[in-house]
Image (tube, rainbow, N blue to C red):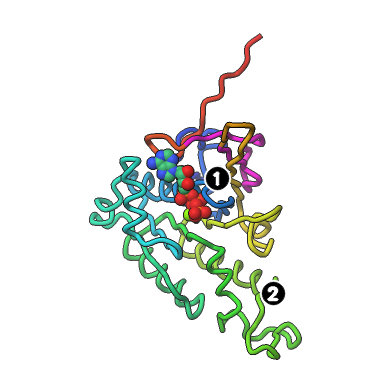
Amino acid sequence: MTTKRVKTGIQGLDKLMQGGYPEKSVILISGGPGTAKTTFALQYIYQGAKNNEPGVYVSFEQEPEQLKETMKDFEMDLSKLEKEKKIALLRIKNANDITDVLELIEKNVKKLNAKRLVIDSLSSVEIFASTFRSMIKDLPTGLVEKRYGFYPPTKTIIRRLMYKMMDYFKELGVTTLLISESQNSEYSRYGIAEFVTDGLINMQYLGIGSKNFRSMKIIKMRQTKHEEDFIPFEIGKQGVGVRKIEKFKA
Ligand SMILES: Nc1ncnc2c1ncn2[C@@H]1O[C@H](COP(=O)(O)OP(=O)(O)OP(=O)(O)O)[C@@H](O)[C@H]1O
Ligand SMILES: [Mg+2]
């Protein structure tokens, strides 16, 4: 059976990965500050909703109003789609446990019959993870450090969190983008998410001489033959789009 594909919403990208993300997969979008992660993900939600694939966007970082303003610059009217119940923009400021976050997501996904989901950012969830009761219960003694009165975020907790979230999203039937703030050579805060997710796209913003170049790279995409080289892109009038490369002809 051929894998069903979910379009990325990014001009020029689908054809570099067999038509889009594998349906119901969980994809990590990693990158440093200002590499257009949020714009990339909002476009995924916007274009999906326009195409009858409703979406839920969960933001830990920015107010929905600010997100809407950003997209207005690219002539993408999120407010209209919100009124039509094709998208939901949720802001989470504090999370007591991952179960609360997942229940809120489930409620909204079911309400909209959503097919698409974005978490902006996974890094925020990871930071909260060590305080999530459901993530630390039943851990073998020794892994849970009680001496300091808090539970340090071990790689075990993060791995548990990832499996819990991924299973949940697959069960809901959505195709998910998890945004990750990458630092140094790792694609995620604890170096775990990039191994357990189904796909990984890394966004970059490089200064070379007096010029700046934006590019992305598909590091992995399970079940998919994809472009392996850097993919230059720009933020134009219609948002993020792959730049056409003039191939040198002999
Ligand atoms: N209207 C616009 N036209 C062109 N470029 C823009 C426009 N609006 C924003 N940008 C560029 O996009 C960048 C921010 O994009 P975005 O917020 O999607 O990045 P991010 O990776 O999510 O950033 P952060 O690390 O802060 O979360 C800005 O720093 C700016 O360079
Ligand atoms: Mg962002």
The image position of residue 127, as x and y in percent, is: 58, 71
Report whether 74 appears left or right of 164: left
Reading the image, the residue beneath label 2 is: 154
Q: Which region shows up in magenta?
A: 214-234
The quarter of the image holding the C terminus is top right
Q: Amino acid at mark 2?
A: Thr
Residue 36 highlighted magenta (yes or no): no
Label 2: which secondary element: loop
Reading the image, the residue beneath label 1 is: 3
Can you see residue 196?
yes
> As rendered, which of 164 and 209 lies closer to the eye?
209
The quarter of the image holding the N terminus is top right
**Looking at the image, which residue sits at the far front?**
210
Characterize the local packing of mark 2: few (<14), some (14-19) or many (20 or more) Cα atoms within 10 angstroms: some
Say whether disc 2 or disc 1 marks the residue closer to the N-terminus.
1
Mark in front: 2 vs 1: 2
Q: Amino acid at mark 1?
A: Thr
